[in-house]
Image: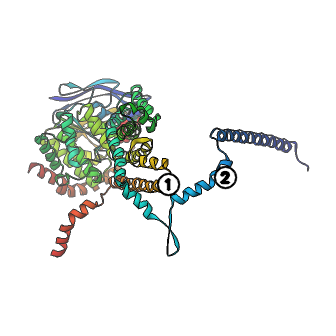
Amino acid sequence: MDVSQQVIDRYQNIRRKRRIRVTIALVLFVVVMSLFFQALVRVGFSVGELIRYGPQFLDALDQYFPQTTVYGIPFLDVWQYWDFIDERNLFSQAGITLAMGFAGTILGFPLALLFGVLGSGRVTPFPFNFIFRGVMSTIRAIPALVWALIYVPLGGVSPFTATMAIATDTIGNLGRLYTDELEEVEDGPIEAIETTGANRLQVISFGMLSQVHTPFIAWTLYIFEINVRIAVTLGIIGGGGLGQVLSTQQRLFQFTNMMATILVILTLIISVEIFSQRVRSYIRADEEPMGILELLKGFPQRMAESLGK
Amino acid sequence: MTYISVENLSKRFGDTQALEDVSFEIPEGEFVVVLGASGSGKSTLLRCMNGLTKPTAGTITIGETEISEPHPDIAMIFQQHNIIGQMSAYANALTGSLQRTSFLRSVFQLNDTDEKYRALDALETVGLLDEARQRARQMSGGQQQRVGIARALVQEPNTLLADEPVASLDPGSSQQVMGYLLAAAQERNLTTVVSLHQVNLARQFGQRFIGLKDGQKVFDGYAEDFSLEVVDKIYDTVDVDRLTADEDDFADASDATDASSTADSTDEVMG
Ligand SMILES: Nc1ncnc2c1ncn2[C@@H]1O[C@H](COP(=O)(O)OP(=O)(O)OP(=O)(O)O)[C@@H](O)[C@H]1O
Ligand SMILES: [Mg+2]
């Protein structure tokens, strides 16, 4: 084809650039794949094992979901779950897990508030607020599971040390959320409180904290949700509650009991989430909707009123 | 007797000369209106007067005190009212008493009964006694501004500074809020400096006027000297025809509001 030299140059240029891009992509692909392969070797992954133990897993599945027949139709035998839940009183175990998450949240709260507030650049002047931010980052860098191990000298892994670990974790996570939230406060109300002649602590609590107390409550509830989940995990390494039941049954190869425990864990976590989300949307709503308590308390009066008409 | 004395006040923000060599004296109990176009330095002047902004040069003396930081005897009312939306009108008014209340008592709202009465009394002064328990965030702009005034009154100041207290309100609420402000200042014999950008309101409520233009004081005088020429000087580009038209409107408006808000509020205060 008859085209100008510029067109040919441009074409060559595009082709060269494209070839370079394709080469780079190919090299990257090969690198990622070889890393992936090495990772598989490291973790001892083998398709042979999958095939060899496949039937065993299917067997276990049968135990995870035990079956019964009603008039010849196969059904999931929920009574087996219920027997275990009832026998081991799993709801009371759920209470221990919930208590760990709850107590850990409350125990961690004061220091989270203190560090969170002191970590804000508006409260502590610039380089010094990073001392508190640094402490919180360090705490966050260590997972709760590791904190539980660190607290082992306090009496082994127990619900008590697990709660301590959750409290420590809360300082890092909740404190950080508080600090971030405080960056959003408006200057106006702070200045206004300053002009009343209030002291520093009063300026912080009335000018700043009063602006963010709703989000603070919401964040605390959010961390509470997470803490209940952590409480399950800590149970698995011996911290009591549902997690511990789960790991015991796993070691006994009682897969039906394991699944029963998992169902209770699901119920607990979902209930906590629903509760926390309800409360959060309630406090965030501008006009407060009527709560269940007000509904019940106000009922006799409203009843009487409607009867009187 | 001179109460507020501003001497050779200048303030520079980087390249902007916000105030340039401004001086004036205000005797005790006067109600002074500061006028000026946007950017003329009204806010800067008021913020310097209560120590929120440090002047580049010059001094401000209020009573016996040379101002360098916020002082309990000087209360400030803000254009954006800056009250705390999460708290009730009553709790907001009560924050005016913070400097007389210890930290723990203030946090748990264990202020002296006298302070609590003072807060309710101030809310009554601004006509919000019935709304005392209402959350500030849910109130109208005018009501929020009146909560800001109540907070300032609870502070028991000698001096009241207000930076465009009605700039974000509709004309009716502006009349009302200015009425409450004037009544409170008279009742408590407060020396008051209010910045405004509505000439009509300034004329209606002001006793003395200070005009700022590009950071300089271009007028300082009492009602009888505050003529249209002066207004023209302060606001370069004012259209005199439009202004006179406004004046007519304003005469009607003031008839109506005199009867409703201003007179009412004064009655309330006295009664
Ligand atoms: N914090 C600041 N930093 C930099 N410049 C500022 C600051 N505050 C005010 N200025 C400048 O100083 C000048 C005076 O501002 P000021 O807010 O005092 O005017 P104003 O008369 O209150 O105006 P308005 O009627 O719009 O509120 C303006 O040019 C403004 O941009
Ligand atoms: Mg201003």
Q: Are marks 1 and 2 in contact (CB under 8 Å)?
A: no
Whole-percent x, y for residue A5 in the image = 87, 42
Which residue is most to the front?
Answer: A252
Which numbered dot is residue B246?
none
Question: What residue is pinned by disc 2?
Answer: A51
Amino acid carrying label 1: it is Phe
Identify which residue, A262 or B152, lies in the foreground.
A262
Whole-percent x, y for residue B6 in the image = 26, 27
In which quadrant of the rendered view does residue A290 lie? bottom left
Whole-percent x, y for residue B265 in the image = 15, 51
Q: Chain of mark 2?
A: A
Question: What residue is pinned by disc 1?
Answer: A255
Ligand 1: does it lie within 8 Å of the C-beta at label 1? no
Q: Tag 1's secondary structure?
A: helix
Is A12 situated left or right of B152 in this image?
right
Amino acid carrying label 2: it is Ile
Residue A108 seen in the current view:
yes
Write the residue at 79% across / 43% down.
A14
Which residue is most to the right?
Answer: A2
Give the total number of marks visible in the rendering: 2
> How far is disc 1 from disc 2 in space, using C-alphas?
21 Å
Q: Tag 2's secondary structure?
A: helix
Q: Residues within 10 Å of mark 2 (few under 14, many from 20)?
A: few
Which residue is most to the left?
Answer: B271
Identify which residue, A26 or B178, lies in the foreground.
A26
**Dot 1 or dot 2, earlier in sequence:** 2
